[in-house]
Amino acid sequence: MPRTWATWGGDLHLEVGGRVRSSLERGLREAIRDGRLRPGTRLPSSRALAADLGIARNSAADAYAQLIAEGWLASRQGAGTWVAEHRVSPPAEPAADQLPMAMPRYDLRPGVPDLSMFPRTAWVAALRRALAAAPLDVMGYTDPRGLQQLRSALSDYLSRARGVAIAPERIVICSGFADGLGLVCEVLRRRGAKSLAVEAYGHALHRNIAEAARLRVHTTPVDAGGAVIDASEPAGALLVTPAHQFPLGVALHPERRRRAIEWAVSSNAVIIEDDYDGEFRYDRQAVGAMQALAPDHIVYAGTVSKTLAPGLRLAWLVLPNGLVDDVIAVKTAVHHLSSSLDQLALAEFITSGAYDRHVRRTRLAYRRRRDRLVAALHRHAPAYRITGIAAGLHALIQLPPGESEGALVARALSRRLAVQGLNSFRLGAQECAPALVVGYARPPEHAFTAALARLTALLTER
Ligand SMILES: Cc1ncc(COP(=O)(O)O)c(C=O)c1O
């Protein structure tokens, strides 16, 4: 009996975007060519496929018709559609030493939101409205701080949603947090800073950016209360993730917040507050930005990389008064502006309320996924514990004593599941207990169930 799509039981990772019909055709051709869809496999009806992928039924029916015409699929009235026989000759087996690493089919690495949730229609509508009303000068070389329309929209949004103490003149738009961090590091070095302290676990990219600005980087330990900030910290600046430490997933303890601010004020240092996923808190109202407690010592940094998409490369800095001119001077010197069209669209997206709606929608979706992850571990793999607060787009799964993180990550990869070990985020000498950093937001909704099942199977197999 031919296996149906349902009994086949895998996930095809058909991701349709752009021109829906042709991307669906391409996805199906590839699935047949690389053997994920075998000859004889019954496909779902065009209606079911369309519902599964969230596309119009006509697009699914047209894609089927095209592939039937090309001979990839076959169909008969009343018998449905299936993958045609003998269409593809299997590729020659590569020599064992030339076997490529299997591409992961299930991806639970942290760092990226569900890109299929990007609000394409609302974004295009915002861009169209903003462009229709935009003055001509936005098409020229614009203010190095970023467009006034976006800074003004952000000023309202950030004070309302994140409690940031703000004025539009203190906002600088940049191309992602990475760009903003580079700018601030450059300014700090020009002003005499020699080093930057970063959390002992974090992004190597951020350390590299600071080093590229010729700052010495050293690490400050992290524990269940977040970054351990020492009053005698010698660096002139500190980079922290207070709302949700990346990757440990804990919040900076209120006492530590206080101490960090005392340190910055008494030693005239600068704290860079990386609020990369502050909108996503599930168990309580999000804790407001630390910046409001010492706006003259804290650079607040936010980004759309988690709320919308990293590909937009849009982020913002809210600067202490004393740094504004220097940051603008560096930005002017390198003439590094973000696209006016993207800035206008985001400004309109925020002021129209679409950004709030989108954040609410994604927050609910990610919260459900986190709940499912917690429930699945509790039920199937209770020896694995999630630590950290209910927030953000990733969770830390502690391994039971004696289990090797590296071996588990390698075993996952051999099962075509990509996960990342905590150790890959280690920046200093401090060593935390082995754990996985699981990005539950990354797979599109239709692939999450299969990815979660693959993860729990991995954790329970012996
Ligand atoms: C800790 C942390 N900060 C900031 C960012 C955002 O970086 P960017 O705005 O450059 O995409 C990320 C994204 O992965 C992150 O994990």
Image (cartoon, rainbow, N blue to C red):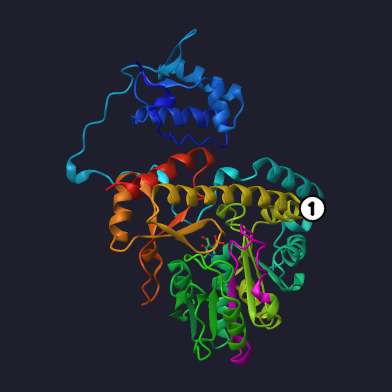
Q: Quadrant of the N terminus?
A: top left
Quarter-of-image position of residue 117: top right
Residue at point 62% right, 63% down?
Answer: 278
Residue at point 57% right, 48% down?
Answer: 368
Tell me where the magenta segment starts and ends, as one range: 264-291
Q: Is residue 373 above or below residue 250?
A: above
Q: Is residue 278 magenta?
A: yes
Residue at point 38% right, 76% down?
Answer: 430
Q: Which residue is nearer to you in this view: 100 or 138?
A: 100
Side (left or right) of 456 relative to 403 = right
* Residue positioned most to the top: 77
Quarter-of-image position of residue 62: top right
Task: Estimate the x, y position of residue 371 in percent, counting from the top left.
Answer: 54, 50
Question: At numbered mark 1, what does the secondary structure look like: helix, strand or loop?
Answer: loop
Side (left or right) of 138 relative to 361 = right
Amino acid type at mark 1: Ala
Quarter-of-image position of residue 201: bottom left
Task: Estimate the x, y position of residue 140 in percent, counting from the top left.
Answer: 72, 59
Residue at point 40% right, 16% down?
Answer: 71
Q: Which residue is mark 1?
A: 134
Crowd tier of the residue under label 1, counting other residues whose Cα lies within 10 Å: few below 14, some 14–19, many 20 or above: some
Q: Is residue 75 above or below residue 420?
A: above
Q: Which residue is nearer to you in this view: 454 or 173?
A: 454
Side (left or right) of 87 relative to 310 = left
Task: Estimate the x, y position of residue 367 in percent, counting from the top left.
Answer: 58, 51
What is the chief secondary structure element of the magenta stretch?
loop
Q: Which residue is nearer to you in this view: 411 or 351?
A: 411
Q: Is residue 249 magenta?
A: no
Q: Which residue is nearer to you in this view: 211 or 453?
A: 453
Task: Estimate the x, y position of residue 145 in percent, counting from the top left.
Answer: 69, 69
Disc 1 under 8 Å from ligand 1? The reply is: no
